[in-house]
Amino acid sequence: MKKGSWKYILATCNIKEGEQLDTLGKYLLLVRPCVFPMTLISALIGGLLALEHVIRNNVAIDWGVFIFNWLLVTFALVLAHATNNMLNDYFDFKSGVDDEEYIRAQYAPHPLISGLVTEKQMKLLIIGSILLFLAITTYFAVTVSPMVIIFAVIGLFISIFYVTPPVQLKHIALGELGVLIVWGPAMVGATYFVLLGEISVKILVLSLPYALLVTTVLMGKHVDKYDIDSAKKIHTLPVVLGKKTATYLTLGMMGSFYALIVLAVIFRYTGIGILVGLVGIHRLIIAGKIFLQPKPTEKPENYPVWPLWYVGWAFWHTQLAGSLFVLGLILNILLLIFFPNIYLLNI
C-alpha cells in the first residue's frame, strides 16, 4: 500500500480507487475502524467518571492497575465493536441482504462480495475475536468481580443477534434500542465497573446523553437505506415509523443530548464543566438543516461514503458533541481538584 493509505481507511472505512491492499489494510477495511472513535469515547466517559469518583472520595487505588484495566477494557470494547461489524457483514451476506445493489457494497468494498476475504477466513476472524473478548472478560471476572459477566452478556447478545437469525434485532425495529444500550449503559457502565468494582444508577443515567448521539448515527444510516430496506422488508425503526417521522426523531435525539447535560447539572448529577458540550449546538443546527433537505442527486466532491448521506452528518455532529462531553468531564475533574467550591455535585 502507498504511504497514507492506512490513514485513509482509518478515516473513511474506504479505499481510494485502484488501491492495492496489504494484509493490515484488508483487516482495517474488514473491521471498519472509522467508527471506532464512538467506542473510544464511551470508554473515556466511563473511565473519567470513575476517576472523578476516586478523586472526590479520596479512594485509595493502585494507579498502575487502574490505568492497565482502563486500557484493557477499552481494547475489549473496540474489539467487540470490530466483531460486531464483521458479524453484520457476514450474516447480512449469508441472508441475502447484502448484494451488489445494496448500499453496503456501494459506499465501500464489502469483505465477501468484493472477495477481500473468504467466508471461512471471516468466520475464523469472528470466532477468534469473540474468544479474545471472552478471555478479557474472564480476567476481569477473576480480578474485579464475576458481575462483569453481566455487561459482557448484554453486549454480546445485542452484538451477535443484531443481524444473526433467529432474532435479528435490526429487522424488528430493535437495533436502534440495542445501540443505545450498548454504547451507553453497557460500555460506559462496564468501563466504570471494572475500574471501581461498583456501579450506580447515576452512572448509567450519565451514559445516556452520549448513547443517544451514537444512536442518531445508526438512525441516519437507516434513513439513508429507507427505500431499499423497505423493499427488502427489513423493518428498521425508520421503516416502521416512516422516513419523515424517523428524521424528526433523529433530530430530536440530537437535541436531547444538550437538554440532558443541562438537566444533569441542574439535578447535580455532575459538575458544571459538562456544559461545555453546549458549544456543539452550532453543528446541530447545520446537521438539522441538512436532515430537513432532500439528499443530493449526485455524489458531492470528495465525499467518501456515497451513497450514504445523512449518516455522515449525524456522525459529524456526534464526533464534536461526544468530544465536548469528554472535555466537560475533564473540566469537572480539574474543577474538583483546583476549585472544589465551584464544582457542583449532589454528594
Image (tube, rainbow, N blue to C red):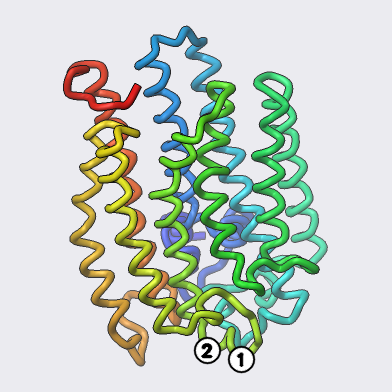
Q: Quadrant of the C terminus?
A: top left
The residue at the point 55 percent across, 59 percent down is 32
Rendered location of residue 152, percent (x, y): 68, 41
Judge whether residue 313 can be spotted in this image.
Answer: no
Rendered location of residue 266, percent (x, y): 25, 39
Image position of 4 with respect to 132: above or below: below
Instruction: Out of 197 and 322, give the one closest to the viewer.
Output: 197
Judge whether residue 137 can be spotted in this image.
Answer: yes
Image position of 200 with respect to 157: above or below: above
Q: Which mark is residue 227?
A: 2
Instruction: Out of 245 and 229, give the one closest to the viewer.
Output: 245
The residue at the point 75 percent across, 66 percent down is 167
Q: Which mark is residue 231?
A: 1
What is the three-letter code of the residue carrying label 2?
Asp
What is the three-letter code of the residue carrying label 1?
Ala
The residue at the point 68 percent across, 80 percent down is 97
Image position of 187 with respect to 54: above or below: below
